Image (cartoon, coloured by chain):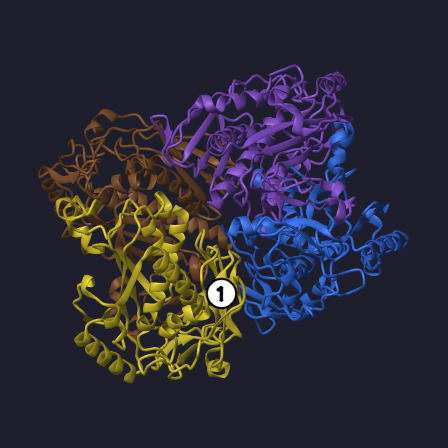
Chain colours: A blue, B purple, C yellow, D brown
Amino acid sequence: MPGNTFGQLFKITTFGESHGLAVGCVIDGMPSNFELSESDIQPDLDKRKPGQSHLTTARQEKDQVKIKSGVFEGKTTGAPILLLVNNEDKRSEDYLDIKDLFRPSHADFTYQAKYGIRDWQGGGRASARETVARVAAGAVAKKFLQEKLSVEFLTFIESVGEVKASINYQEVKASDIEASLVRCPSPEDSQRMIELIEKTKAEGDSIGGVVFGVIKKMPKGLGEPVFDKLSADLAKAMLSIGAVKGFEYGRGFLASTMKGSEHNDEFYIKDSQVRTKTNNSGGIQGGISNGEDIYFRVAFKPTATIAKNQNTIGLDGQAVVVKASGRHDPCVAIRAVAVVEAMGAITVMDHYLRNK
Amino acid sequence: MPGNTFGQLFKITTFGESHGLAVGCVIDGMPSNFELSESDIQPDLDKRKPGQSHLTTARQEKDQVKIKSGVFEGKTTGAPILLLVNNEDKRSEDYLDIKDLFRPSHADFTYQAKYGIRDWQGGGRASARETVARVAAGAVAKKFLQEKLSVEFLTFIESVGEVKASINYQEVKASDIEASLVRCPSPEDSQRMIELIEKTKAEGDSIGGVVFGVIKKMPKGLGEPVFDKLSADLAKAMLSIGAVKGFEYGRGFLASTMKGSEHNDEFYIKDSQVRTKTNNSGGIQGGISNGEDIYFRVAFKPTATIAKNQNTIGLDGQAVVVKASGRHDPCVAIRAVAVVEAMGAITVMDHYLRNK
Amino acid sequence: MPGNTFGQLFKITTFGESHGLAVGCVIDGMPSNFELSESDIQPDLDKRKPGQSHLTTARQEKDQVKIKSGVFEGKTTGAPILLLVNNEDKRSEDYLDIKDLFRPSHADFTYQAKYGIRDWQGGGRASARETVARVAAGAVAKKFLQEKLSVEFLTFIESVGEVKASINYQEVKASDIEASLVRCPSPEDSQRMIELIEKTKAEGDSIGGVVFGVIKKMPKGLGEPVFDKLSADLAKAMLSIGAVKGFEYGRGFLASTMKGSEHNDEFYIKDSQVRTKTNNSGGIQGGISNGEDIYFRVAFKPTATIAKNQNTIGLDGQAVVVKASGRHDPCVAIRAVAVVEAMGAITVMDHYLRNK
Amino acid sequence: MPGNTFGQLFKITTFGESHGLAVGCVIDGMPSNFELSESDIQPDLDKRKPGQSHLTTARQEKDQVKIKSGVFEGKTTGAPILLLVNNEDKRSEDYLDIKDLFRPSHADFTYQAKYGIRDWQGGGRASARETVARVAAGAVAKKFLQEKLSVEFLTFIESVGEVKASINYQEVKASDIEASLVRCPSPEDSQRMIELIEKTKAEGDSIGGVVFGVIKKMPKGLGEPVFDKLSADLAKAMLSIGAVKGFEYGRGFLASTMKGSEHNDEFYIKDSQVRTKTNNSGGIQGGISNGEDIYFRVAFKPTATIAKNQNTIGLDGQAVVVKASGRHDPCVAIRAVAVVEAMGAITVMDHYLRNK
């Protein structure tokens, strides 16, 4: 039954509920002698945290991370690292009215079916709050990959609802993403997305979106053949995020419409390195990185929580009407940009250690 | 480094190369006292095997499976089951001309980068031939799920290249799929697909496609929260198949354009069961099955092997031209229908055992 | 590299250093809907805690456990359970003089060789303090096994140094163990052991001992054939405790001197149950429990820390003399009784879940 | 439930029954580009095989191993290696009379209790025949460790029944072990052991024994802190062998009678290396190798199968008398020397890869 661990050699185990005492994770497998402090992790948590703009949930959490073990005199020791974030803005009373019913398209019903019990406070374990732990662990992985291997991560919003930005990822700068409230590097498209989210929020509704991830300067040879392909583990990493309904890398679904002669990437030598002229493969061939950029898309459905009346049933099967209180996240994909980046980093870190 | 095992409680470990002595797998975790014989497995292998029609590779393999352990007097004993298929149509000489070069978009280069050696005979371990083992193990899982839990699997081709069939999966019958050379339940669309594949093959080219999978009569409560969501493991299962570039379930990428009020599935009671009126979720909520049909799409790129001249480089970095010998598979998605179904069954079986 | 997790389905991951901020663990796999509170765990921690008598280390720790996740309204939810114990009596200054040397037979040298860094405060991660987490997790397992399956655990000291108690484990009562400062159910032998430990302590020395473990009312059929035998996992569990040098179960090493006709346990029927007349097997046959009592011995070496001058070398290889400050544990086996019992319970719990 | 895999990075999965078609294993994780052929493996199998002298079972098996995958042009490729040994001397008819009863101290009853079915032919999966696969995999690990790291393995019989050889392991030569029918390096003690086994066999009885294992020239730093200590994994490896009842390393149980001042190993510098003057620790401190010799003992009980009348019960609970047919192994420890050595090599290989 245990399902709260990700990774083989960079292994994270997360814990905590939305309105419980704390959320966090244990990282087991972090290489020793690497400089690490809470300030390396906090900036990524700040990108994920609720209440950061009027476009996200209004819940107020500082999400201050504490390193409780595994770091000694500023360096990792090889021992497991406990990252702990206390919950502050707990409001179980806000959820009393949903205690005895199943919210549509939430995990309320399936948890009840599986466990015979559920923590109904804000979704309990099924809440997006669990991703705090992922972002914290991802920040550790990113720091290592950036400093030791120069790997770069770029993650941004490509679309919100029907508003799709037309972006050449190779021209995107991190600062362009940071400059946008919706983490979309195109200012014009950002504005259209913001307007759509504001309108959706005003209607008490929510909207889906697509996150685009890029991993640059990848080392060659990462990924294990057959089941633990780098692409397969990225897919699992992304689909393990709540609200994700699809994943594609390289040309993705579009590749299914192409001919081999169009899709194949020609090898050549550049600066004494084996390179490909095109990169339809998305940096992974046979499940193993080839050194080209990895790029992928992750599709998020609209948040299930909406401030509109919805028909559903209670625990006893009686028909009831439910309406959320109003702190809902109109477009969960925005804050999930940080989560996608974290899961990408954790996956690459794990495969880096597996390939050593 | 090991990456040849899939599953936690229904655990398969595959082995074998394209033109080596044999391919197969060990299944560890099969429940005891279940009737099993080679004839339960062979029909699924026949659906995957090469040379079954003019639309696939011309390689001739009977793919006859032998159960070498774990079954006693016709029943499983709980001991590991070795499934072994000897390779017959081995032609290493066919590959002598590609021995010293990297075929575009094959795993030749990444294997060489990772291992410093590669079995160049038909792709070696990276060959689609490895999926023989998956289909064999999948047949075992399917038999169990069908007999013990009445779970049903329907898997078919939805599109080949730009030719997309318009199919309501709820009306598809297994016999419609079986009747089609391209495993598409729509006869008209099948015909268009066949023509496209014939044309592509005649051009020495290959073409991609999309496989659509359906799992009906799913038990509720399968899947583990957080990382080992049923959806995440399905994604990994599918992306672990060579040539797969994308996975989506339920509304998939389309869900990213929807509003919560459109996408949410309303709960109600039908025949004393909790059901949903719509099934945009695709049968999985919070990573756990809710009893509705699971449906998903798997995108296959065109086979990298084509009978056209392509520029590439040799092991020594010299520019060379490569052209395949002519036994290539013009649309690998067709035979992969059996592989997708097998991986779906293996994933569900694993989660069934995890949920007991 | 990760090695801080034990168990497959009842999975514990421990963290924390001797003089770091906290120690504890995450339990993943605990069945849902089981009543659990901190007061179920504290009594076992009290048996392990330092400073409980003049026969143990003088370090003062209350070892108060907090449940930070996974329990909702007094019941487990199936989500991971974080058990956290803050360190209070941290005295890193006590260890400044050993910072730059390798204490004989400690893990100082091997950690340095492996990691290139070590937390020298009281042994850091290699400290017996890590076992706080095991005892806490073991208490959870024990409560479940006792309440749901009536399994009983009896664990006691059989010998300290050359002082060996002559005990028929079948006559031992838990209260007899509790009544002894050294956790030996024989009052006379306890007294001899206490005297030996007092004398040893006065000499600034330490002494080894043997812990005897009994598991009664075991369900039949627990344990997996081949590698994950119940006996093999018990052996690993025990040898994973610091200072343990040997494990035997049933007749153990003595069985190597016996004939088959002496050692074999005759089957017969008693109260409609298959039982054995003797129990030389120690309750496990072919790696699987047969329902008879499991009994085993665990050998502890003397604590490496002693208050005597010892020759060793510094980090730079120079010869130095080291002498511990005086808070050393003269017989670590005494407090380890609780750890052995915890690891036994965790192992049985894991196999119970694996056998469901 | 799966329990047929050992190791994390050098992962072996065994399969096969005593009188089934074949036994063998898949090795996943073998480093690539290493020369390997069947002739590297066969000599170790010959040391384990039945019928090699009048002191073992009379079953006739050539135990010829075939490498079916993972090796290409004489070198490993990094792909999984299938090692297959066909069973030849299958005699299921020999076991018809034990089909419906539980042999005392065999796994017959526990398998039946666990699985509700058992392969009664010579013990089926519970047979020592399963160890063929371990010895084959161990030979691969040994070759790697010897050639790449100069690690040396010495494994011999220290005692048979009450006959204990007085051996200083540091003076033992491999050729002395090879020269002895009972794998005891002392010729005089060998003779006494042979006589004891002959006498025991003549009486239709069996006798236990102790295997002594030595691993020389170990690299420093192998083993993971906390649960996956090298010592803990060695213990599990050994206790996973059928008939093993105890394991100790270094001073083992004797250490429990020692004082810290006696047991502690003093560090000093020799040839610029950190060494210890004594080696009471047995080469492992804090669960991690320190570069000194690892030495350990493994206690084997007498084989359960004896050619004497024994009381037991049938499947239906009726009292019956059972007597083995006469091909029994009078001292299973002798052939198990090869198995202990193999499991030691597999464990070290796994930790070598984990420490890279």
**Residue A345: x and y, percent?**
66, 54
> With respect to residue B5, does A129 lie above or below?
below
**Residue C16: x and y, percent?**
50, 69
Decide if residue A135 is on the left or right side of residue D237. Answer: right
Tell me the kind of residue under disc 1. Gly
**Residue C304: x and y, percent?**
35, 73
C295 or D225, which lies in front? Answer: C295
Decide if residue D275 is on the left or right side of residue A105. Answer: left
Tell me if residue C100 can be seen.
Answer: yes
Q: In which quadrant of the rendered view does residue D170 lie?
A: bottom left
Dot 1 crowding, Cα within 10 Å, few <14, some 14–19, many 20+ = few
- Name the residue at the top extreme: B54
D20 or C301, which lies in front? Answer: D20
Q: In which quadrant of the rendered view does residue A56 lie?
A: bottom right
Tell me if residue D217 can be seen.
Answer: no
The chain carrying label 1 is C
**Residue C167: x and y, percent?**
18, 66
**Secondary structure at numbered mark 1:** loop
A301 or D40, which lies in front? Answer: A301
C6 or C152, which lies in front? Answer: C152
Decide if residue A324 is on the left or right side of residue B91. Answer: right
What residue is shown with label 1?
C74
> With respect to residue C68, does A322 lie above or below?
above
> With respect to residue B168, does B240 lie above or below?
below
In the image, what residue occupies the spot 56% across and 66% down? A82
- Name the residue at the right extreme: A188
- Name the residue at the front extreme: A318
